[in-house]
Image (tube, helix red, strand yellow):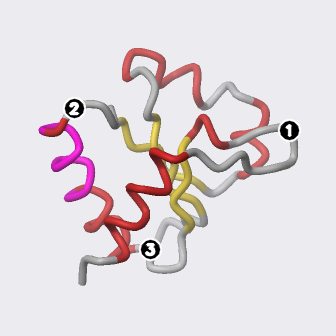
Amino acid sequence: MKQVKYILVNETDRKNHHRVSDNPYVRDLRHYHIVDGDLTSSLSRAELVRVLVELRRHFPDAKILGVSEIGDHCIIVSDAMNALRRELSDLP
């Protein structure tokens, strides 16, 4: 079974999915799964939440982070991702 420690939400641009994995800070995380998601669209948000809930069932210990939150050896928390994480924490 695939080991996933981080579920990364590419919340900026779906077209740049391949560039995300080239990011050196993302590569340092090693065991991750990238989910494309646009946090500005309500339809996309509902789909994104559904996908994240399903991934959380398979990988309950994985941390959910936005790609934009990953910085030089630190996490820069964003309000949009915090709102998404709060929404997920309210779900079963």
Q: Amino acid at mark 3?
A: Phe
Direction from residue 48 to residue 47 in the image, left or right? left
Residue 53 image point, x, y percent: 28, 67
Looking at the image, is 69 positioned above or below residue 50?
A: above
The residue that label 3 is drawn on is 59
Label 1 secondary element:
loop
Residue 51 image point, x, y percent: 25, 56
Label 3 secondary element:
loop
Direction from residue 74 to residue 90 in the image, left or right? left
The residue that label 1 is drawn on is 72
Which residues, given as a range, are shown in magenta? 43-50
Viewer-side label of 2, 3: 2
Q: Residue at x 36, y 36 (%)?
A: 36
**Residue 44 lies within the magenta run:** yes
Q: Residues within 10 Å of mark 2 (few under 14, many from 20)?
A: few
Q: Residue at x 63, y 57 (%)?
A: 31
Quadrant position of residue 26? top right
Q: Residue at x 32, y 65 (%)?
A: 87
Looking at the image, is 64 positioned above or below residue 89?
A: above
Q: Amino acid at mark 1?
A: Asp
Label 2 secondary element:
loop
Q: Of the numbered discs in the image, which one, if any, rests on residue 41?
A: 2
